[in-house]
Amino acid sequence: MTAIVFGESQKGICKKSAFEVVSFAHQMGVQDIIALVTEDTTNGDVLGQYGASKVYKIKGLDSGAFDSKVWAKAIADFSSSHNGNIVIFSHSSFGKSLAGRVAVRLGAGIVSGVNALPEGDLFSKSVFSGKATIKYQIKSATKVISVMGNTMKPIAIGQSVAVETIDLGAAQSSTKVLEIKRVEGTVPLPEAEIVVSAGRGLKDPSNWGIIEDLAKALGATTACSRPVADAGWRPHHEHVGQTGIAIRPNLYFAIGISGAIQHLAGVNNSKTIVVINKDPEAPFFKAGDYGVCGDLFEIVPKLTEAVKKFKETHS
Amino acid sequence: MNILVCISKTPDTTAKISFKNDSKEFNSDGVQFIMNPYDEWYALVRAIEIKEQVGGNVVALNVGGSDTEAIIRKALAIGADEAVRINAEPTDSMFTAFQIAEYAKSKGFDLIIVGKETIDYNGSELGAMLAEYLDLPYVSYASSLTLDGSKAIVQRDIEGGVEISELNLPCVISAAKGLAEQRIPNMKGIMMAKSKPLTVVEPVGFESKIQTIGFTVPPAKSSIKMVDPNDMDELVRLLSEEAKVL
C-alpha cells in the first residue's frame, strides 16, 4: 500500500501536524509513505524520522501562497501517477480546503476529521459536535482522509530520507495571498496540547494577566469563550466553541466559563478537562474530569504557583 | 451579482442525539430541525448584504426532501430572492456537492457561498468539492468577504492568525463567524417569502463512495473529581499521576 501524505509547513518549516500525519500513516502499518511538502520547506528530511520513505518538494508551491485549486491538482496528479492508495491530510485550515478537492479529482471516497486509526477500510470521526462517533466504510479503491490534530502522538523511528524536488507544472493562478497575520511566539490553538481558557467569570479584561501567568507556567496556549471574544476582551481567533474553533488538547482548563452547550461543542473532545468556577451549579462541572469550586481570583494564582513548583521538581 | 447560497437542515444545537435501527441511523423522532447556523447567519446574510450593495440576485439552494421547505422559506424570508430544492436526501457531502454542481454549472453564478460546516456531521468538505466540480477558486472559513470589481478579497482564519487572499470571480467561499451578523426575518419578509419562486429539481444519478456503518455514543463521563480550592498541589498531582497530562 502506498500513502501520499501532505505535510504542512509554515514559513518553510514543517509543522507538528506534518509529523502527526506521516506518523499516522506509519501507525496504520503503511510501508510506502510518500510525503509531499511545499517547495520552500527546508526541513522535509525530518519527516523520515516519523516514517516517510520519500519526500518530494513540489515546485511552485509556497507555504505562504496558498491556492487550493493549484495545490489540490498537484497533489491529486502526483497521487494518480504514483498509484497512491490513500491520500492523507491534517484536518487544518489547509487540509479542509484541499481534501475535498483532491477526493473529487480522484473520484475517491473521503472521511474528514478522522479521530482514530482505521480498521481496514473503516474510518471513524466525531459527529454532532462530539456527541457521537460515526464509522464509515470508504468503498472506492483510492481513499482520502483528513486527520484531527492530536489524534496520534508522532512516533520517531529514526529513519533518514531523501528529499527531491518534483515539477508537476504547478503555477499559482486564481488565488493570490495578499497578507498573513500571525500571533508570533505561541503555539496555535488547534495544535496546542494544553489550553487555558477563560470566560466572563474573569469580570474585566485587565484581569487577564492571571490567565497568562498560568498558561506560561504550563507552556499552554490561551483561549476564551464567546462572550469574552464578542466583548473584545480577547481576539476572535482565541474563541473556542461551536462558532469559534473546535480543539482537542490533552488538557483543557475552563476558568470562569459556565459551560453552555455551544462552548462544550468546541472542547468536549479534550482528553482531560479541569473546571474552575465559583458556581457549583455551572453546567461545565458535568462535562469535566476535575473540578475546583471557588473564587478563581484566589485559585488561579495558587494553581500557577503549584505548577511552577511541580515543574521545578520534575525538570 | 448572481449569488448562490447553499443551505442545509441540521438538528438544533441543543437537540438530544440518539440513533435507531441498530445504531445505523440517526433518530430524528422529536428532533427540532433548523437551518445550519453557518449557512443562515453568515453565508446567506453576507450574500444578501452584497446584493444590497451592488444589486443582483440571491438564490438559496437546498438538497433535501420536501420536509426542508420550512428552512427554505425562512431563507426567502430573510431576503433570498428565489429558492431551489434538489429533491434528494443528502446522503454524503460528495453526493450533495455533485448535485449542486450539476445544477449550478450552467447558471453563471458569480459567487457561491456555503457554511464552513454543518453542525451535525462537521465535515467541512462541501465547499472544496463544489469548487473542484466547477473548477473554481475556493477559500474556506472566510471571516470577511468584500468585492473589488471582478475580484473577491477574503480573510480567513488559519492556525494562529488570519490569511487575506484575492480571488478571481467566480469563486466559492465557505463562511465562518465574523462574515456577517445574524438577521431575524421580519413580518414583511415572511409575507413576501410566500410568493417568491421555489423550484424543485430532480437529482442526477451518483454512486456514493462511502457508506455509514454505524454510530457510537461516547461513554458518559464518570462524575467529576472535586479538588479542595486550597490544595492546588493536589490538582497538579492528579493531573500528573492520574490523568498523566502534565
Image (cartoon, grey):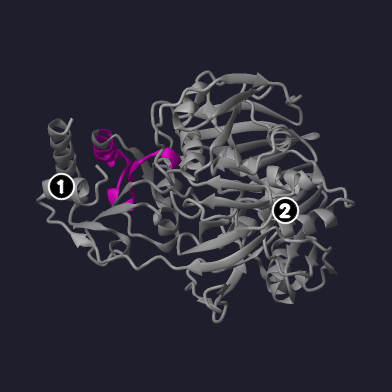
Q: Residue at x 40, y 32 (%)?
A: A156
Viewer-closest of A221 and B89: B89
Residue A37, percent from left and from top: 59, 27
Q: Earlier in the sequence, mark 1 or mark 2?
A: 2
Q: Amino acid at mark 1?
A: Arg
Label 1 sits on residue: B237
Crowding around mark 2 (Cα neighbors within 10 Å: few <14, some 14 to 19, many 20+) is many
Q: Residue at x 68, y 65 (%)?
A: B91
Crowding around mark 1 (Cα neighbors within 10 Å: few <14, some 14 to 19, many 20+) is some
Viewer-closest of B68 and B48: B68
Query: Does residue B66 show up magenta in the picture?
Result: no
Q: Determine the image quadrant of residue B172.
A: top right
**Left or right: B68 in relation to A257:** right
Instruction: Tell me the chain of label 2.
Output: B
Q: Residue at x 52, y 41 (%)?
A: A25
Whether residue B142 is visible here, answered yes or no, is no
Bounds of the magenta segment: A190-216
Q: Amino acid at mark 2?
A: Ile
Residue B204, percent from left and from top: 84, 63
Q: Residues at badges 1 and 2 in contact (C-beta under 8 Å)?
A: no
Q: Secondary structure at mark 2?
A: helix
Residue B48 got which mark?
Answer: 2
Q: Determine the image quadrant of residue B189.
A: bottom right
Query: Does residue A208 show up magenta in the picture?
Result: yes
Q: Is residue A134 above or below residue A192?
A: below
Q: Secondary structure at mark 1?
A: helix
Most distant residue in the bottom direction: B29
Residue A196, percent from left and from top: 31, 44
Most distant residue in the right direction: B106
On the same chain, marks 1 and 2? The answer is: yes
**Left or right: A250 in relation to B95:** left
Q: Residue at x 24, y 42 (%)?
A: B246
